[in-house]
Amino acid sequence: MAEIQASNWIDGKASLPGSDPTKIFDPASGELIGHFQASDSAEVARAVKAAKTSQSHWWALGAQRRTEMLGQVAANLRNLSQSLASIESREMGKPLAMAQEDIEGSADLLEHQISGANDFFAETNSDLGRLVRKPYGVAALITPWNYPVCQVTDVIGALLSAGNTVVVKPSEKAPLSVAALSEVFSCLPPGVVNIVLGNGSTGAALIEHPDVDLVHFTGSVSTGRKVGAAAGGRLIPCFLELGGKDPLVIDEGVDIEWAAEMAVHGSLFNTGQVCTSIERIYVHKKIAESFIAEVVNKASEWTVGPGNDPINKLGPLIDADQRDLIHAQVFEAQLNGAQVLIGGEPIPGPGFFYPPTVVLNPPDDSRLMTEETFGPVITVCVVESFEEGIKRANASSYGLSASALTKNPENIEVASRLNAGAITINGGGTGPEDPPFEPVKASGSGRIFFGPKSLESYTTAYAVNIGEAK
Ligand code: NAD
């Protein structure tokens, strides 16, 4: 693949804000794959101005026309999924097929989100309606590197369908695939979507800009605190989708093979670099021995290597810092009495690879159990009872998602007391359509809907009181 020179996309045109390129390397090989130029506050201001100028026109087009245009965005996303996935896989390491599947799934989600816009605005904006919903205006969409394309496309359809215009600021660690999204958005009027590449300062400048009306941030807890404070200082709404330390509690009596598959897939998928990765497993002592043996078996089958070789299920980590952090957590837990059953040592050679690692009984107060790991590490703690597992699962500062496996109807009740934004019992997935997702504790804030109801989140309500004229 030729080196990529990624550009900003402002007012429907590509732009390069400076002459000081930041290089992007393939995390599997260390090879230079592209560069971008970090945007300063003047470049951010140009993007916000374009978004503000186009917003009234975009809103005035009406829900039906916006829906048609966004349908084209979904089609473009599907048509370009292969090339986008190939850039994404190169810049952050995930298996190519998985990247493409994610992007195609995101096109489906976008279509689903925009499908209710006509009805939504017809109901809320009728002439004599007392509650009128309108877009906020210009939205800042700041995203992380672990799903570079989907973190933008999973959200932007709803923001746009609601009548907002958007300035996207992707992660400086994986900006190339997001820059390539300009082709996907080229069917929209200029200024409706703008992309500014850059680091934390670029993101901070965007939130501080007086014409930004809403912030949608996905990233770490530590950055989320800064983003929340900056948005709070400006008194603008802010959605925070942050990190997790998600638990899985496993009861006695469940099928071992099934439980081990859930545990391994949930922990290792995307090399554990998923906000909702399973990072703490509590298993009932009565099935612990056979469960652990099956987890070790299954985890050992996850072949490690570059994402462009279909044989590999586990790509590299994003960078050396991430690999060092994971290893430090595993090593410290081991020093404090945990048993490392497989893995536990970085793989030497080019690229930032870490093997599938299974750690037994890390101390509750170890960083491996209290801080987000974001790596291919499966931690298993043996508990005396299902209740003890639920109690320890809830003893965390995070609350993104949580899951449990049990055949016991009483324990299903107990599991519903898990304290997280999304609770999954026995794999679930059959709840009411489009249930809201609202992270708790340090995992974030703001109610997100994945379907047409997302328009509720991204519009603001006005009361219109009409009295009798005299
Ligand atoms: P990060 O917090 O380091 O960066 C996220 C984004 O914020 C980047 O674009 C970055 O440039 C920007 N940024 C940094 N400082 C900023 C500032 N002061 N103001 C504004 N923007 C700033 O996160 P990351 O390492 O890119 O992503 C990994 C994290 O994201 C993990 O914690 C993961 O759990 C979380 N995540 C959460 C979800 C979710 O839906 N809850 C989804 C994916 C990832």
Image (tube, rainbow, N blue to C red):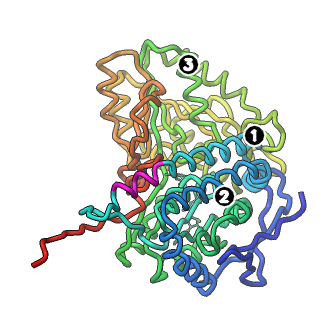
Residue 126 image position (x, y, % from top left): 32, 61
Instruction: Pick the residue in front: 32 or 452.
Output: 452
- For the point 75% across and 42% down, the residue is 95
Amino acid, disc 1 = Ala
Residue behind mark 1: 97
Q: Is residue 248 magenta?
A: no
Residue behind mark 2: 321
Beta carbon at label 3 within 8 Å of ligand 1: no
Above or below — where is 88 with respect to 228? above
Badge 2 or badge 3: first in the primary sequence: 3
Q: Secondary structure at mark 1?
A: helix
Amino acid, disc 2 = Asp
Beta carbon at label 2 within 8 Å of ligand 1: no
Category of crowding for the residue at label 2, using alpha-carbon neighbours closer than 10 angstroms: few (below 14), some (14–19), many (at least 20): few
Q: Is residue 120 magenta?
A: yes
- For the point 66% across and 58% down, the residue is 321
Circles 2, 1 touching at the beta carbon (< 8 Å)? no
Q: Is residue 174 visible?
A: no
For the stretch drawn in magenta, the main secondary structure is helix
Residue 419 image position (x, y, % from top left): 34, 41
- For the point 45% across and 47% down, the residue is 370
Distance from disc 1 to disc 3, alpha carbons, whole Å, reads 24 Å
Labels 1, 3: front one: 1
Q: Residue furthest left?
A: 470
- Which residues make up the magenta segment? 116-123
Name the mark on residue 68. Answer: none
Residue behind mark 3: 258
Q: Residue furthest bottom?
A: 42
